[in-house]
Amino acid sequence: MLRSDALHRENDGGSIPRTDPKWLLIGIAVAIVAWLALIPLGFLIWQSFLTADTLQAHAAFTLQHYLAAYFSSESFELLATSLTFAFGTAAFSLCIGTFFAWVNERTNTPLKPLFFAMSIIPLVIPGILFTVAWIMLASPRIGILNLIAKSWFGAEAPLFNIYSMTGMIWVDGLHYAPVAFLLATAAFRSMDPSLEESAMMSGASTFQIARRITLKLAWPAILGAFLILFVRAIESFEVPALLGLPIGLRVFTSAIYEAVNRYPSDIGLASAYSVTLLLITAGGIYYQSRFLRQGDKYSTVTGKGFRPRTIDIGRWRYASASLFLAYVAVVVVLPFLVLLWSSLQRYYTVPSWAAMRNVSLGAYERVLEHPGFFRSVWNSALLAVGAATLVMLLTSAIAWITIKTKIPGRWVLDVLASLPLAFPGIVLGLSLMIFYLNFDIGIYGTLWIMLIAYATKFLPHGMRYNSTSMLQIHKELEESAAMSGASWLVVFRRIVLPLLKPGLVAGWIYIVIVSIREFSSSILLYSPGNEVVSIMIWEFWQNGQYVELSAFGVMLIVVLFSFLMFVQLASKRFGVSES
């Protein structure tokens, strides 16, 4: 009937309604986001209820994986270890980050211009490299600090043991401290200081003001930061794998890795562990968003203007500056120096005048001549640029749909695009592995599956950058162009995208940097010939090639740091948003 009506209109010379490209774009965006975020997750849960499919027997429904994951003798220990590690890391990094953020924003400590730049440098160092550097520093057997203590002071027992729960919390906490610093800095910077000034005029001490006013006003932001750090810690893989597995200390991420890499692989058990991990991270993100929604009652910035003022902490300002320099030495200088020293040796050895005779650039030459070096660099660059471009273009369309339209149910699209935030990297890798093993379209074992993993993982980050920029574009610009006869596609391409440029570029740069560091999902998805730089570092470590690993790490840190400096200069030159 409909076809005959259409033909009738066509025969009558009537025009066939043209498909609006807007709806085509919306359909494609919904399909891609649902494909990326939902389907692998569904396959992961489905696999957790199936036995292994073998030549002798087809897969069948079972609950044995959950029984093994929840009711075995190791279940309670695994859960307790994971929660202890995550809580400890989150608390440790939050204490460091919040303290230095308060010092930087609210006190008259000297050297403050250095605070921000130096504090975010650890974010550039890949997690696997940071962990390896601390193994070289504080391992009981090869740690330089222990060897120096033994050589110089005659210490018989090792002073430091990085292979312990304390060591895991120390390394992961130091690596995530910059995240806490950035989150707390934003809260302290936007706080009206009038309440603190009133307390000061009433005779309160600096410590009382910080404890009873500043920290209480920043409480929602600090609690939100704690939950973010908790989620990041519980999905952390590099530190538990390198420091925990050698001593039998397992958390969920390392247990998933072990279940996949044992022979034969126990994908069902790994899936059951992944579902548990997914529920914990989803719970953390849910409560973090709830705290943010309740933040209104702590607001101090009103329509009245305010001028940020710093607190004079007297002679303590030199102590705080000294603490900051010590922090930079521990977090940035020591790890980099130990990698640099190791990279200049023929074999790994403790620093000494005698060892200075062995200094050479041989490790760098061997790395450059390694057949996998340029391939891994090229693969990482290709994946980083591809994932960043794909994510920023896709999320620009999603942000437009969720913010600029009144389509019923558009919030579902927003939720779908934010869903990967709850995916730990190793869970995402496992779900994609299961899905594309069962749905064979020829991308398993190729760079394409890693590109999908990267794009899925960083989808929420792209949404954040694009949504922030999209909110600043008033709809009257689009309406004016439409009234002048421009189609929706022309308006989006020539008005919306150019106005989004600062957010697009800033988000693109961020995703490029974090993609090059990515390890936890790559470790399950790479295949020979498709290694990325983090996998090459892992292989050097597994093979005991410490000096080559150090040389590769030094080159990687220098390149990433140079790229970050170039980006900052470009941001000032071209006005790129750093939101």
Image: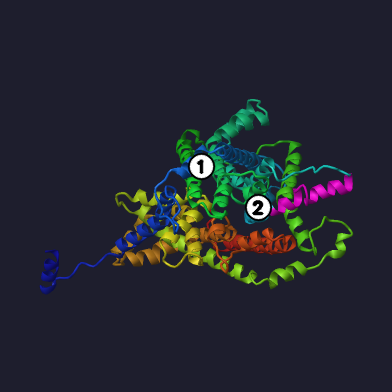
Residue assigned mark 2: 122
Residue assigned mark 1: 69
Q: Which residues are magenta?
A: 132-153
Q: Main secondary structure of the magenta part?
A: helix
Q: Nearer the viewer, residue 415 or 311?
A: 415
Instruction: From the viewer's perspective, tell me whether residue 415 is left or right of residue 13.
Output: right
Q: In the image, is residue 479 above or below residue 180?
A: below
- Residue 507, percent across and down? 51, 58
Q: Residue at x 42, y 63 (%)?
A: 497
Q: Residue at x 67, y 53 (%)?
A: 130
- Say which quarter of the image contains residue 565: bottom right
Q: Nearer the viewer, residue 218 or 205?
A: 218
Whether the magenta-drawn stretch holds residue 501 is answered as no
Q: Amino acid at mark 2?
A: Pro
Residue 530 has which mark? none
- Say which quarter of the image contains residue 372: bottom right
Q: Nearer the viewer, residue 494 or 239?
A: 239
Q: Amino acid at mark 1?
A: Ala
Whether the magenta-drawn stretch holds residue 134 is answered as yes
Q: In the image, is residue 313 above or below residue 124?
A: above
- Residue 493, percent across and down? 39, 66
Instruction: From the viewer's perspective, tell me whether residue 38 is left or right of residue 486.
Output: right
Q: How far apart are labels 2 and 1 at the CA level?
A: 35 Å
Instruction: From the viewer's perspective, tell me whether residue 373 is left or right of residue 53.
Output: right
